[in-house]
Amino acid sequence: MKKENKKRIGRSYWANIWRKFKKNKLAVFGLVFVFILVFLGILAPWLAPYPYDEVHYEAVWTPPNRQFWAGTDQLGRDIFSRLLYSLRNAVFVGLGAQAFITFIGVTVGLTAGFYGGTMDNILMRIVDIIYSFPSYLLNIILVLVLGRGYLSIFIAISATGWAGMARLVRGQTLSVKSRDFVEAARASGASNTRIMFRYILPNIMGPIIYAIFSGIPGVMLLESGLSLIGLGVRPPMPSWGLMISEATGQFLYNPYMLLAPAGMLVLTLLSFNFVAFGLRDALSARE
Amino acid sequence: MSLYIVKRLGWIVFNLLILSLIAFALIKSVPGSFLELQMLLGQAGTTATGLTVSEIDKIRGVETEMMKRWGPTVPLWEQYITFIKGVVTLNMGPSFRWPTQTIEEIIKKTFPVSFTVAILAITIAVLIGIPLGIIAALKQNSWIDYMVSALVMIVSAIPNYVMAVFVIFLFSFWIPILPTYGWGHPKNYILPVLAMAFGPIGSIAGYMRTSLLDALKQDYIRTAWAKGGKERHVIFGHAMKNSLIPLVTILGPMISHLILGTVFVEGMFGVPGMGQYFSQAANSRDYPLMMAQTVIFGLILMIMNLVVDIIYFFLDPRIRVSRR
Amino acid sequence: MEPLLNIEDLRVYFYRPEGVLRAVDGLSYKLYKGEVLGIVGESGSGKSVSVLSILRLLPANGRIVSGSIIFDGKNILELSKEELRDLRGKEIGIVFQDPMSSLNPVITVGQQVMEPLLWHNLCSKNEAYERAKEMLGLVGIPLPEERMKEYPFQFSGGMRQRVMIALALICRPKLLIADEPTTSLDVTIQAQIIRLLKSMKKEFGMSVILITHNLALTTNFCDRLIIMYAGNMMETGKTKDILSNPAHPYTKSLLDAVPDIEVEKELVPIPGSIPSLIDPPSGCRFHPRCSYTMDICREEVPPLFNIDTDHYSACWLHRRA
């Protein structure tokens, strides 16, 4: 009798997804790596062997050795420490800006797709207007205007970024809206907000979560792009983009100057992408 | 349909006005920009051309032109009107950084370059990405699928400027067949296009794969099998139609990303395109050029988005029909 | 007379991470030309799975473990992919439960109805168009010419189901399988659909397998019935025999649970719930919920006892000494 009961206890929706996700080794690896990276990033000030701006003129362009684990750049600064601080930077901007983007984008997209009509028109007009702006250019301009601090980069990135999410969510809402269960919910007297958030939203979580996890790399890329052209966080505070731009001309003198930040950037992005793909597969597979 | 397009074009004009206002307002609010007009003019002009201020002024009447447009005596709203009129009539005055050239001259020679590179890149990405995604989806969990998925993921995680370096390294140093720098020959296009196409190939293939797999799990596919469909009927006749539609939704942002991404990548290859000019302008605070380029970029993006929307409109009957 | 469809000892299992789900565990029946067979049971009884197996349309983790399915002299389980494809849609048509998700939302209805003809190369595109139009009219869709160009979401639920029926029958198959065709529709529409099926049967003369959990729908349509429970057949026989003289306790309970508009009676639900098919009850699978359970019911699976002409029931109650 007891054995029968135990087998009866069905698996919850998310437990199922986790199980499928687990099967994808790459995705799990990615997730572990993401956690490690975030952890490292947060603890960077305590983990870095050297301050990121300390110069060692006697040891410029050294390849990795016991003293400088990833070598030094043209001013003799320890690349490894700078990598850690760049990681911290990236994590902060990536997670923060993406959260902001998601919150605004989902709310706007759901509302627009669900209500349709004038509300949809107005909201989508706003989205269209923002969406049609050349975002990178405005990001650059905003950074010039607001100065080169974290907050300004934060604002600059999320001010234009939420539009894409809103559009996606609206499209998904539209295709789910005509399904019978929505009509059923409406017929049973569910309030509009309830329908949106308890009925429609769970059914479109797949693309949304995927968008979040593939959005974070985008944000990080944007941040490093900004610093690549000299508009990221103020030097000497490092960022991968900055390190890459400094390294490009000197690729032949010390390839590690380029490989290290590029490699870290790619690894971080990869981990997030692995998780995103794993999530996507896990969410879309059917029993 | 044509009514829709006309409406959209109207909105584009509206959007551009708002964009120009925002860009203008933002740039004007940067502390101390136009007030140091003379100083900047002197600095930028002499650095760029090696000529002295008076020499430049003699050639082009640059200083007077600048004062007329952006000088501290001109009220803001008038500056804005001049700006708008300038963009529309393609008469925008000289650039700060390159005072011997007018902005419209710069744009006229750089726009085709960037645009060509971007279009080539997206075309290659679509031509390679979609079949790749389809193959991966159809041979799910085979080694081909894993390889493609892995490739896709790695490739889409490498930013185009890093890809640029690798591509340069590979094809210019290791196997010295392609030129790194320089312009004028079709050969020069290959490396930049390659570097910029890699990311989109990854995204498109990955999205295509997921989208197709999603579609194949649907009930209507079972119906198609039940009707006696061959592989090509079910997969290409039915599933593909459903899976291409969501793909179009990512095409828009991808194209925008590509076109805007030129800002970061062109510098590496010495591609004389709008992107490179913008990033240099940003660094040297060349505001008139930046403002004009912002509006022009905006126009390009808006037209591209309209095109994508029209395509989506034709593809998805649910949206097409419910508009009636 | 040779049966059109002969199923013997069919076993269909699903391989889940929790265990092996025995959806159909030893099912055998025959279907003759021109017959209407109703398969009745609760959800999870295996009725849908059994007919999906006929066309080998099971999901990826399902497997036909043993048994044989002989259709028109050919063993379906041994057919090549191409031969199977030839059967599907042409010799055997199937109507699914949910017409909204079973129709492709981005392809016109007309196209979807034409496809069985085109895919089997039965006629030209023009002729297929005409035939599809005709078929839509036959199934009761007004203004077929215009509606052909429309998309599934522009149709109501009942209309969509008619479309499904149209595309299932357009090649004049020998067998039509209707898998719970009315379950997702309103009650008033349900009757319409059954009536439509009846008239189609009259028009084309094919055999029909109707799957439903609602016994009431079978009364005027099905010639014979199979009552299924938890993957096994409990009772089978002519419809009127079963309805007037149910032999199996499960069938009796089913009838007791159905409201009757003429006679006022107490509705008696069946106690307990459907057993797990991963770890089914020993012996007769219905024994935990049966009011007549005996010791042997727990130990051995009852065979089909012949109660009357063409009336069988798998219950130990029928055993004589």
Image: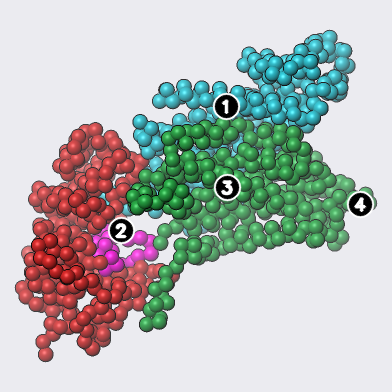
Chain colours: A green, B cyan, C red
Query: Same chain for the residues at labels 2 and 1, yes or no?
Result: no
> Chain for mark 2?
C
User: Quarter-wise, where is residue C110 in the image?
Assistant: top left
Where does residue B240 sit, x and y in percent of width and height? 41, 44
Q: Which residues are magenta?
A: C43-64
Q: CA distance from mark 4 to mark 2?
A: 70 Å
Q: Are marks 3 and 4 in contact (CB under 8 Å)?
A: no
Same chain for the residues under marks 1 and 4 in the image: no
Instruction: Give the residue at mark 4.
Output: A56
- Number of other residues with Cα within 10 Å of mark 3, as a class: few under 14, some 14 to 19, many 20 or more: few
Residue A10: x percent and y percent?
A: 42, 69
Q: Do the residues bearing badges 2 and 1 touch, measured as CB atoms within 8 Å?
A: no
Residue at x-position 26% and y-position 47% = C157
Is C233 covered by the magenta stretch? no
Q: Residue at x 77, y 55 (%)?
A: A84
Query: Is mark 1 in CB contact (under 8 Å) with mark 4?
Result: no
